[in-house]
Image (cartoon, coloured by chain):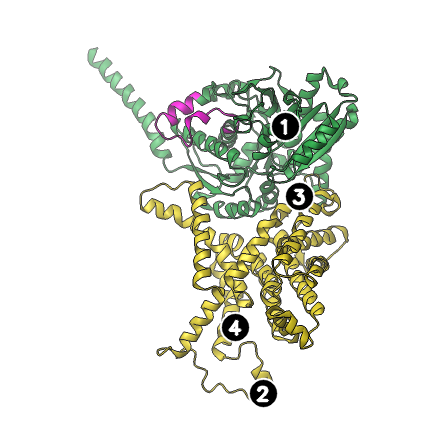
Chain colours: A green, B yellow
Amino acid sequence: MRLGTTLLAAAVMAAGLSTSLTPPAFAQEQTQFFPLLVFRTGPYAPSGVPWANGFVDYYKLVNARGGINGVKVVWEECETSYATDRGVECYERLKGKNGGATLFQTMSTGITFALTEKAPGDGIPILTPGYGRSDSADGSVFKWNFPLTGTHAASADTQLQYVASLVGGLDKLQGKKITLLYHDSPYGKEAIPILQKRAEMHGFELTMIPVTHPGVEQKSAWLQIRQGRPDYVLLWGWGVMNSTALKEAQATGYPRDKIVGVWPSGSEADAKGVNGAEGYSAVLLQPGSSSDSQVVKDILELVHAKGEGSGPQEEVGEAVYMRGVVNAMLSVEGVRAAQEKFGVGKTATPEQARWGYENLDLTQEKLDALGFHDVMREVKTSCTDHMGSSWARAYVWDGAKWKLGSDTWFQADMSILDPLVKASGDAYAAEKKLERRGADDCQS
Amino acid sequence: MFYRENGQLKTSYEADQQIFPIAQDRWAIVGLVAFAIVGVPLLADEYTFSAILIPFLILSLAALGVNILVGYCGQISMGSGAFMAVGAYAAYNTLVRVDGMPLLLALLSGGFFATVVGMFFGIPSLRVKGLYLAVATLAAQFLSDWAFLRIPWFTNYSTSGSVMVSELQMFGWRIDTAVEKYLFCLGFLIVFAVLAKNLVRSAIGREWMAVRDMDVAAAVIGIRITYAKLSAFAVSSFIIGVAGALWGFVHLGAWEPAAFGLDRSFQLLFIVIIGGMGSIMGSFFGAAFIVVLPIALSQALPALGSLAGIAVSTAAVSHAEFMIFGALIVWFLIVEPHGLARLWSTGKQKLRLWPFPH
């Protein structure tokens, strides 16, 4: 009897050991390569550094948690300085390395445009969560682009919905004056069509003021704002343009609580240390800053506590850092989805990963299990919808940190977005002589 | 020794006026071009084509144009980026707006419109020179940045202000792969290099050089200054415009005005200064230096770091790149202010008298 239990226990232990040992040992061979186009230098580095750190920390966390079903994540950075030609060079350099790139996250709207022309030929998905070209939400034209969790058009729409919630509803926008202060680049211009459409619908007066790269020259823009006295200013800045805008607003005497930023204008770096930034709000496509979420705790415990963190510990959980984390998570979860179809524990090819991104179903339970509770909400993509969802929340700067502005989640009104996206997708398809993907192509 | 020209006698004017009068030179160049057309496509991989060779070819072409203006005619221009932008957007517009427009014609029309704009901005050169002209041409840069950002017609009303070209096709040849793109650019470069070389050897080229060396003296001996200066602007902008169109069409595929910003103008000026002012060969050397060095550094530094057991971060590589690059430029200009082309010809001179150089 006693011998029997001992033997049984030994057998159980041996079985347990062998199952816990063999798969990782076997999976040592399997790696999944994620190239990173980062900009840690140049005029936009203040935003680029925490973004890149968030990416790398999350990949480290995935490996600490045992990889993607045992497949180890490898990554390599390439510095673009936010310049398109450097981005193209990085793309060419990295696409064949380490067994081939799973995907590319461009981290720049300009690079997105260039790679959109190149990636389909190579069969590599382009992930642009929260940015990218707005019309690429149309998966039946842009087979390889995935602007998951929202595009710039969705940003603009949610931003306007927040403004409407401040004045008491969309119908109250009638007769209001709204100014769009935007970075004069593809990124800033992506906001224009949707706002014009909304202006037509709700009868507010929209003025648009471009600010040239990098955005430190804003005196004349704020002179115009002082003359026009708009009810709200929508800020579409990037890097140094944001803090400059807040300083100019104070110098002009324009109330900061009437300025509403978009996610690239809503990072800690933008408002920290700027006198009189209190009251400035920003509508952030998920995620915002969430330093008390489970994933942040995990990163601090499994990565930073071991001295392997990529940046200063204080920035973990800040808004742009979290964007890196979420973007990295999306890239990993797409591969996980692909593995479920093409073989768990195996490296996914770019083509398989593309399937994964197209059939992504991140339910709230899955996100909670990954530690993203209250960081972001569910994302579900399909053949036609490469955006998945566009949840956004408003945050207000209280002088030291971002606080949730309201508990409501906003989501872009697809009945307004869809026709614009479709028209733009049609124009693109016509120019490139592409056919919209048929039902059979959607199965692949 | 290696370069001896004893016995190479010229018996006709044609033989005396060849581009490369020494047989060794001639054969070396023929061999090099043959290697570029046949050998390189067999040897290089896709990365080398897309990231190094194609940008190198296109920037060499642009540098040829800048060299004609700055190196041969002595008109300092900071508007090269603008002329590239005009070339790219004009080529894009002709391709999009004219039905059935052949690619070759579209690219050349980019050159044509760049010529028009270049000559317009060359008019101040009739009155001002040197630094003042540099500032005047800088205006072209600002104007083009403004126009291509703000006038939606130029971008065919693209909502984001970014334009792209659909597949490249010429005489039924689809230019798809990196090798084909490389050969396409190489074709342009060879044709334009031969044309430019012959142009600067001709009467008009000598007029440019006379204007560069001393315009008053040139006027005294009967050279039409207006004609010389404006023709230099025209030829140079044409070549730069075609290079710009190639940069947008072939290298980037989709672009925004930032691709042709002020940085690009400076880059081209550096290429010409480092490569060698007033030398066709120098344009190639300079472009190779500017394109290859940053990439080589960004690849080599982490490798060197790991040899020494130091993990070099991406940002550190980028900063080191700037520092080493800057230091090398200063070092080059002190050691050889006439650029890499002069180093090359000094080397040839030494080889000619080897083993007893004096």
Same chain, labels 2 and 1: no
Percent from the top left, x then y, of residue B120? 72, 58
Chain of the residue displaying label 1: A
Same chain, labels 4 and 3: yes
Pointer 1 with pointer 4, Cβ within 8 A: no
Amino acid carrying label 1: it is Ala
Pointer 4 with pointer 3, Cβ within 8 A: no
In whole angstroms, how far apart are the C-alphas of marks 2 and 4?
22 Å
Residue B124 in the figure: left or right of residue A283: right
In whole angstroms, how far apart are the C-alphas of marks 1 and 3?
34 Å
The residue pinned by badge 4 equals B30
The residue pinned by badge 3 equals B162
Element marked by disc 4: helix
Kindly tell me whether residue B42 is visible in this rendering: yes
Element marked by disc 1: helix
Percent from the top left, x then y, of residue A382? 62, 30
In whole angstroms, how far apart are the C-alphas of marks 4 and 3?
41 Å
Assess whether residue A311 is covered by the magenta stretch: yes
In whole angstroms, how far apart are the C-alphas of marks 2 and 1?
78 Å
Q: Which residues are magenta?
A: A297-321
The residue pinned by badge 2 equals B12
